[in-house]
Image: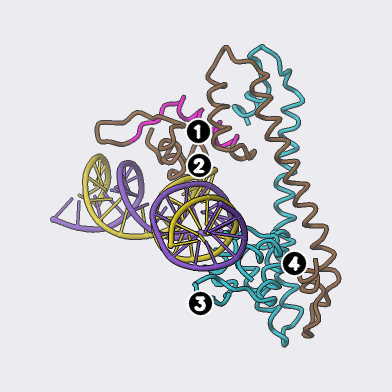
Chain colours: A brown, B cyan, C purple, D yellow
Amino acid sequence: MNIGDAAGRAGLPAKTIRYYEDIGLVTPHRAANGYRRFTEADLHKLTFLGRARSLGFSIEECRALLALYADDGRASADVKRIAQGHLDRIDRKIAELSAMRETLSHLVQACAGDQKPDCPILRGLENG
Amino acid sequence: MNIGDAAGRAGLPAKTIRYYEDIGLVTPHRAANGYRRFTEADLHKLTFLGRARSLGFSIEECRALLALYADDGRASADVKRIAQGHLDRIDRKIAELSAMRETLSHLVQACAGDQKPDCPILRGLENG
DNA sequence: ATAGGGGTTCCAGTCAATGGAAGGTCAAGG
DNA sequence: CCTTGACCTTCCATTGACTGGAACCCCTAT
């Protein structure tokens, strides 16, 4: 199938699929007219990629996961290590955002939000 | 003072400060030899910027906040709107990451992490 | 023949820095 | 006076993961 159909079925923009080919994540064959031709196996890869990306795995992690996915002799430990590392990163990011949220919500609550210039948010940014 | 001292006192890399000048967030004067010269007011701005950035405000939000900071006739409502918008964005991001975390932690828990190829994580990525 | 809806490549831009190269400036020490 | 080393300067390239757009090719239907 052509890239438009592949995009529709994988739930990815065609542009993203071209990009994935560019960086070697998928390697569709070409028809005589130069059009990319996607097999069901290509589609599987693209869907897999879409899911992995939507879980926040980086492109390089996706590359590693795809390689493991294609390797019948893989050890699930290798997959788990990647996923656990990503999970840890997510936890760190959530903690970081929660800390921001904590500080920021206090400042926002303290701000009258009226026409007067006095502002606890600006004071908070000024004085730490 | 020179950029190195400004960087040390503001807690920002010198490179970042040059970048901030480049995009017009600060406009230090120049000494005869071409070196940037930072006043205490410049330093105040840089510190303000560092705090705002560490709370996750975008550069454009920082620009707007700095302008309000400098405007004695500001309405705190304008500050609050920016901060509330950012807070909402943080909440959305936390929700997104929490959803990822939820899915991913289930998959990781289900994975034996041994030498065998069977892997619930890969199956999860394959089948949604 | 032409209109449209595909497809192709390549280049630029996003965001917020960061790394590095090539070179100018300054104070201290020999 | 010269050198060393720590500063400082500008400019260009790179990051991640796309996304937008230009210019052009292909195919089908009218």
Q: Earlier in the sequence, mark 4 or mark 3?
A: 3
Compared to residue A96, the image places residue C2 above or below, namely below
Q: Which residue is mark 4?
A: B84
Q: Which residue is mark 3?
A: B32
Dot 2: chain letter: A
Residue B121: quadrant of the picture? top right
In the figure, is residue C23 to the left or right of B26?
left
Q: Does residue A47 show up magenta in the picture?
A: yes
Residue drawn at x 46%, y 43% is: A16
Magenta segment: A36-52
Q: Are marks 1 and 2 in contact (CB under 8 Å)?
A: yes
Where disc 3 sits, the SS reads: loop
Quadrant the C terminus of chain B occupies: top right
Residue A120: quadrant of the picture? bottom right
* Cα separation between marks 1 and 4: 38 Å
Please tell me whether the stretch drawn in magenta is mainly helix, strand or loop.
Answer: helix
Residue B69: horizontal and vertical position, in percent? 71, 78
Disc 4 versus disc 3: nearer the observer: 3
Q: Are marks 4 and 2 in contact (CB under 8 Å)?
A: no
Residue drawn at x 68%, y 72% is: B45
Using a 10 Å C-alpha cutoff, classify the residue at mark 2 as few (fewer than 14 neighbours), some (14 to 19) or many (20 or more). some
Using a 10 Å C-alpha cutoff, classify the residue at mark 4 as few (fewer than 14 neighbours), some (14 to 19) or many (20 or more). some
Q: Which residue is mark 1?
A: A46
* Cα separation between marks 3 and 2: 56 Å
Where disc 1 sits, the SS reads: helix
Disc 1 versus disc 4: nearer the observer: 4
Three-letter residue code for mark 4? Gln
Where disc 4 sits, the SS reads: helix
In the figure, is residue B121 to the left or right of C13?
right
Three-letter residue code for mark 2? Leu
Residue A12: give its label.
2
Compared to residue A75, the image places residue B71 above or below, namely below
